[in-house]
Structure formats: structure tokens, C-alpha cells
Image: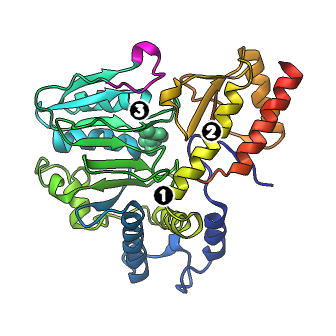
Amino acid sequence: MRALNFNGGPAALPLPVLKTVAAETLDWRGTGMSIMENSHRAKEVVAMAEETQADLLSLLGLGREWKVLFCQGGASLQFAMIPLNFAPEGETCDYIDTGLWSTKAYQEAQICGAKAHLAATSKADDYTYIPGEFNFSAKPRYIYLTSNNTVRGTQWASFPKNPPAPLIADMSSEFLSRPLDLSDFVLVHAGAQKNVGPAGLTIVLIRPEWAETGKKNLPHMLDYRTYIEHDSMFNTPPVFAIYVAGLTFKWLRDEIGGLEKMRELNKAKADFLYQAIDNSGGFFRGTARKDSRSPMNVTFRLPNEELEKDFLAEAKKVGMAGLNGHRSVGGMRASIYNAVDMAAVRTLVEFMAEFQRKRG
Ligand SMILES: *Cc1c(COP(=O)(O)O)cnc(C)c1O
């Protein structure tokens, strides 16, 4: 029996995608072998990778001014690649600190020699909200933010207006959960394992024109231009992960009906779950400020850690997995990514009500 999977990442994938993967494992597209066994230079594989890039741009409504890159090293390598390319040798870049992953990105920029400036942080309030006021530096190369904070369960509802420099965002834990207006952005990155596919693939959207402004003579694998020039095939890309991501894009387009529809479905799920939390008379307590709540990662606490331990143990017994908070903060976290449907959220809410009835 399949678990109801509320993992923060790697996380649930759409069932139709997994079924296609299973069906195609022994013979992919008539090649007589699995996708994993094909050469990345095989024409079928190259065509699949190109189709995946085109499908992604079309889902997002983006044109040729954007390029899709298939990188490796997780979102974590992007933390370094971004400053290495765009703020080398002490150039200023602004960071907005909204929790663990943005803190890491900020620290990594410093390690890479950038002059990283903190334009805002919600650290003093335990990262419970998304800042609305920014102290940007005079001439930053870029402004970096984390659009959805997986650990704290917060999300940017809208991005800084008229920013003094191009925006760059880590969108790992919300990528393709809603339509995006990327007019102020030059680069977006997302580890696949939250909302798109298996770990090992990091999707980067970049404006090639912006990439050209980057530092020259970096090691090839750290230079965005290498990926652009070689269509992400300078070395062997994570072919299997790209293939699964491609199936997810088609699922989003053909079965969900696009990103606006996905946003509506995600909002309905999140509203339902947050309502259950808010209507529990304080038994369940949301940790993020209401105006900053994430529709993807719903973080909450119970009255004490004893009850939280029991909650997790009982949830596990009835087939619900991954409800524990990130190890750095504890508590509960229900990650309700695109592939987690309303039925799963309803089951969780029923379980929560039953647990409160027995133990509240
Ligand atoms: C999971 C996550 C990361 C870390 O990704 P890796 O692929 O493990 O490097 C970074 N940023 C965000 C927002 C995440 O959710």
C-alpha cells in the first residue's frame, strides 16, 4: 500500500508519473533499454531533454529570452555558483534572510568572496514571517531571496516592487506550484526533489543575456555559460531525473491543466489544512505568521513534545509519513506539494481531529 506522503523532500511524485516510469523501465521509447541505460548522446535522449526544456518554458509562459539548465549539486551548489559568477572579487550582492536556506546562501556568498549585504532578516522573530521592508545597498549586482521557506513554512506572496537590481530566487520548494511573473528576475533555481522529480537534478532558469555578464574563466562546471553553450550536456547530465521531471511537466499541463489551475488546487488544500489548525481551539498552533503562510509546507505544533511524538507515531501507524518538522526546528510539518492531493489532506485533517478528540 502506498503511504500518504507528506515528506519535505525528497517528496511525493504524481502517481501517473510513477506508473509511466514503471511501464517504461525495461524499454523506453522503443530503444530496447531503460532511459537509465541509454547514452545521453542518443538522439532519443537529446530529443527528450529538449522537449523537457520546451515544455517547462511553455508551462511558465516564458520565451526564448530564458534558458532552462539541468544542473547537479542541488540547490546548495547554486548558493556558490551564483556569487562565483555574478559577484566575484568583492562585488556587492544583497540577500534577504528568511531562514535556513537563505542563511546558507548568504554565508556561501561570503565564502566565495562576494560582499554580501543583508537587506532584511526575520531572524529576530524566529523566521516566522517574510519581511516587507528592505535596506538595499547602493548598487548591488543582484538581490537574492528564497521564495518558499521549506523549514519555517513561509512563502513570499509577492516579490519586492521596483527592486534596485535584478532578483534571483531559490524556488526549490514551490517550483511550478503557481504561475510566476519573472519580469524582475534573471535567475531562478530549484532542486527537483521537492515538487518536480527525483534528487540529483537542479533546474535553473536563466536569462542568457545576464549569464554573459558573469565572470569569465571559471572552471567549466561552475560557469553558467558552459551549460547554456552545451545545452546542459557538457558532461553527463542526470538523465533519469530529467526524464521524470519531463513527465511531471506533461502531467501538470495535460492532467492538471496548467499552473493557474495548480495554484487553485494548492490553495484549496492549504486553506483546508490551515483552517483545521486555526479552528482547533489552540490545540494545533501554526508557527508562521498568517500573512506569510506557505501553501506548500504547513508547519504547526501541538501543546507539548510528548503529544507531538505520539502524533507522529500514530500518524505513521495509519500510513501517513513525513509529518515531522525539519530537524533544525522540530514540531510538525505537512508538506503538501503539487503531487499531494486534496484526498490526502482530508485524511490528514480527519486524523488531526480524531487525535485531538482523544488527547486534547
Ligand atoms: C531542500 C532545499 C534546499 C537544499 O537543496 P539540496 O538539493 O539538498 O541542495 C535548498 N533550498 C530550499 C528552499 C530547499 O527547500
Q: Split into 4 quadrants, where in the image is the C terminus?
A: top right
**Circle 3 crowding by C-alpha within 10 Å: few under 14, some 14–19, many from 20:** many
* Residue 167 in which image quadrant: top left
Is label 3's Cβ within 8 Å of ligand 1?
A: yes
Foreground: 19 or 45? 19
Q: Is residue 129 magenta?
A: yes
Residue type (three-letter) at the residue carrying disc 1: Leu
Q: Secondary structure at mark 1?
A: helix
Residue topped by disc 1: 259
Write down the region rendered in magenta. Answer: 123-132
Q: Amino acid at mark 3?
A: Trp
Residue located 46% across and 53% down the image: 176
Q: For mark 3, what is the residue?
A: 101
Describe residue 191's horizontal placement relative to residue 181 as left or right.
Answer: right
Instruction: Choose mark 1 or mark 3, whichever is in front.
Output: 1
Q: How far is disc 1 from disc 3 in space, using C-alphas?
A: 25 Å
Asked if residue 343 is positioned above or below residue 158 in the image, the reply reads below
